[in-house]
Image (cartoon, rainbow, N blue to C red):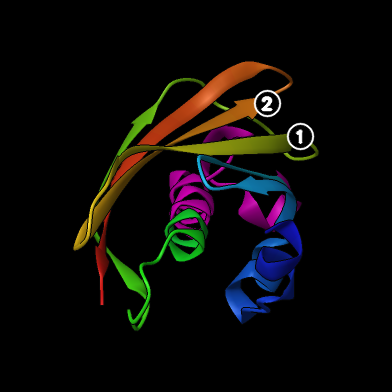
Amino acid sequence: MLETVRARKLPFVEVLGIEFLSAEPEKLVAKMLVRPEFIGANERIHGGVLMAFADTIGGFATFMNLPAGSNGTTTMESKTNFIRPTQAGATLIATATPLHKGRRTQVWTTRIEDDGKLVAVVTQTQIIL
């Protein structure tokens, strides 16, 4: 599964610099370096970057679990809880696990951590196309 995910070359994944570390039907793990261009106010990572990272991971997790005959997936709803800030140079680890894997929708929770400390939790609903 990991090679399938890594082989899916999407420009936005390249822009964010996401590297997939492991891929299983019930868990997807990826990392991303916080680059200077990701920094917003107060020298901390911009919240939109965290949301984009989590949305990408949740979308890929759904992609790995698409039912036969589907045409893909897209985000229907997303909620982010920001727990603590992080700075340029940090390596973030995102871990997505499913809350629900149905025929028409999937719901994933993605935990983003910096050095083992929770930075954000994102819960998103993906619709199966």
Marks 1 and 2 sit apart, C-alpha to C-alpha, by 7 Å
Residue 1: x %, y % from top left: 67, 59
Q: Is residue 75 magenta?
A: no
The quarter in which the C terminus is drawn is bottom left
Q: Which element carries disc 2, helix, strand or loop?
A: strand
The residue sitting at 34% across, 71% down in the picture is 73
**Marks 1 and 2 in Cβ contact (< 8 Å):** yes
Q: Is residue 97 left or right of residue 99?
A: right
Residue type at numbered disc 2: Asp
Residue 34, can we see it?
A: no
- Quadrant position of residue 43: top right
| Residue at which label 1 appears | 90
Q: Residue furthest front?
A: 68
When the figure is inspected, residue 65 is found, relative to residue 74, above or below; the finding is above
| Residue at which label 2 appears | 114
Residue 95: x %, y % from top left: 57, 36
Question: Is disc 1 surrounded by few (<14), some (14 to 19) or many (20+) residues within 10 Å?
Answer: some
Upstream in sequence: badge 1 or badge 2 = 1
Q: Is residue 12 left or right of residue 122?
A: right
Q: Give the residues drawn in magenta, as a range.
A: 32-58
Magenta region, main secondary structure? helix
**16 or 126: nearer the viewer:** 126
Q: Which element carries disc 1, helix, strand or loop?
A: loop
Residue 62: x %, y % from top left: 42, 58
Question: Is disc 2 surrounded by few (<14), some (14 to 19) or many (20+) residues within 10 Å?
Answer: some
